[in-house]
Image (spheres, rainbow, N blue to C red):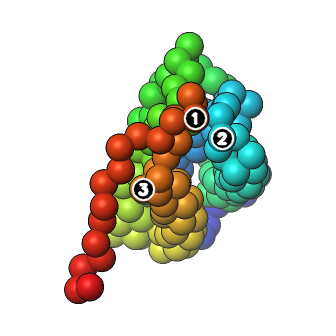
């Protein structure tokens, strides 16, 4: 097979491949957690969260495939085992823990925000340290999708929540700035 000659050294390509594999591992953990919450959510928010998380895990599945294909485009091999994912992921599992619907949303917000912070760093490193503007642009698009998903989830928990018992917690009145 001919040597890859796309204007990046082997070291630059490998550096970017390592970043992408970490993003792949984190995305896979987030996918698993999103699917698990999709299956386990109960309470008055069931239908809206069940549908929202289905949309999210479909997007995550597409993104995971795109990340793996970007790794292959650069001549690398994507991590493809649960053991491999767990070794390099920055996200943590919450195995055996089934939080309330609001707790699930809060956990997913934290995970999306962690991915956003990681990708922001990976965008900078891809472009500046490894001179791979293509991957920097690719990661920027993924980061923006995570920003939107995090916003949707944050909006859910910033609204009036209902506990699984059907009771409403004490509410705090918020006044918009400038009103």
Mark 1 crowdedness (10 Å alpha carbons): few <14, some 14-19, many ≥20? few
Q: CA distance from mark 2 to mark 1?
A: 7 Å
Question: Are discs 2 and 1 less than 8 Å apart at CB?
Answer: yes
Nearest to N terminus: mark 3 or mark 1 = 3
**Figure quadrant of the C terminus:** bottom left
Q: CA distance from mark 3 to mark 2?
A: 16 Å
Q: Is residue 50 above or below residue 80?
A: below
Task: Name the disc covering residue 158, or none.
Answer: 3
Pick the front one: 59 or 133: 59
Percent x, y of residue 99: 52, 26
Badge 1 is on which residue? 166
Q: Residue furthest top?
A: 96
Q: Nearer the viewer, mark 2 or mark 1?
A: 1
The residue located at (52%, 55%) in the rendering is 156
What element does badge 1 sit on?
Answer: loop
Mark 3 crowdedness (10 Å alpha carbons): few <14, some 14-19, many ≥20? few
Badge 2 is on which residue? 44
């Amino acid at each position: 097979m001919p040597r890859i000659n796309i204007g990046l050294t082997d070291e630059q390509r490998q550096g970017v491949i390592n970043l992408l594999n970490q993003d792949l591992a984190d995305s896979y953990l987030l996918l698993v957690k999103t699917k698990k919450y999709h299956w386990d959510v109960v309470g008055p928010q069931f239908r809206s969260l069940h549908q929202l998380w289905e949309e999210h895990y479909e997007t995550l599945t597409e993104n995971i495939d795109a990340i793996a294909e970007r790794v292959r485009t650069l001549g690398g091999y994507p991590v493809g085992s649960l053991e491999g994912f767990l070794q390099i992921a920055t996200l943590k599992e919450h195995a055996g823990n089934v939080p309330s619907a609001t707790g699930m949303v809060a956990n997913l917000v934290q995970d999306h925000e962690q991915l956003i912070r990681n990708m922001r760093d990976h965008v900078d490193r891809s472009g500046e340290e490894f001179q791979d503007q293509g991957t920097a642009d690719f990661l920027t698009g993924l980061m923006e999708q995570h920003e939107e998903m995090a916003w949707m989830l944050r909006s859910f928990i910033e609204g009036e929540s209902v506990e699984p018992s059907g009771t409403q917690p004490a509410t705090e009145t918020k006044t918009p700035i400038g009103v």
